[in-house]
Amino acid sequence: MSLSVRELTFAYKKTPVLSGVTFDAAPGEFLAVLGPNGVGKTTLFRCILGEQKRYAGTIAIDGADARTLSPRETAHRVAYIPQTHAMTFRFTLRDMVLMGTSHALSPFASPGKAQEKIAAEALDRLGIAALSDRSFDTLSGGEQQLCYVARALAQQTRILLMDEPTSSLDYGNQLKVLSVVKALAQDGYTVLLSTHNPQHALWYADRVLALRDGRTAACGPTA
């Protein structure tokens, strides 16, 4: 699946956040969205996910206008991977990944064997199947982040939006998560990963969208 953004402009009331941002992301591509905190990276993702619709410009997800997609339709196309955060409930790793299949179920249905198989395959692919019965809050930061990635894979979309997923991780876990993400892009996923670390973009991304003051400072091959 591809993603195309044209002249995206957004403001919170009278405070401009994004102005004329334009880029494309193709299948098999790792695009780093690079810029300091507060530059509009998260707002960009919220617009793509349909959480913010009052923007100017266009966002096309595999050719479909993002504004016209319902939350369920968007979830069939795009998966969101957040930063690691504390959980209120003690879900197991398996349950967390199963949540990625919920968009394909009717409102009152529970995951069945088909969904459990999808979740198991995602856990196995990321090498964390042995942790399936562990409570999420007992995992390390790197393991928690891989859990979020597995949940996104269980969603069975081909576009992954990752909002500074390594910001709270130590150096070793940063490299582990980024290596996994790079491998997913090489397998055909379209990956957008926001970061304020230029080294992450340099070492792992195929292309970079650099933002400054809500505008495109540069966009092109990482080199």
Image (cartoon, rainbow, N blue to C red):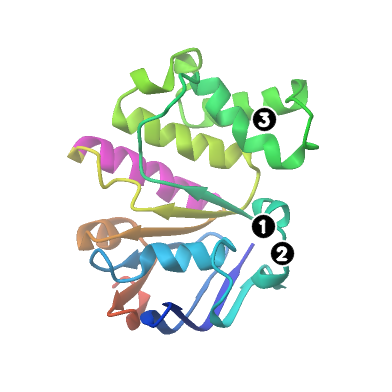
Query: Can residue 96 be seen by looking at this rendering?
Result: yes
Q: Residue at x 72, y 56 (%)?
A: 73
Q: Amino acid at mark 1?
A: Thr
Q: Earlier in the sequence, mark 1 or mark 3?
A: 1
Residues 36 and 131: in front is 36
| Magenta residues (range) | 172-187
Q: Which residue is mark 1?
A: 74
Q: Which residue is mark 2?
A: 69
Secondary structure at numbered mark 2? loop
Badge 1, how many Cα within 10 Å: few under 14, some, many 20+? many
Total numbered labels: 3
100 over 182 or under it: above or below: above
Q: Earlier in the sequence, mark 2 or mark 1?
A: 2
Q: Nearer the viewer, mark 1 or mark 3?
A: 1
Question: Which numbered marker is on residue 118?
Answer: 3
Q: Which residue is farthest front? A: 13
Verify CB contact (< 8 Å) between mark 1 and mark 3: no
Verify CB contact (< 8 Å) between mark 2 and mark 1: yes
Residue 183 rendering spot, x and y as whole percentages: 45, 46
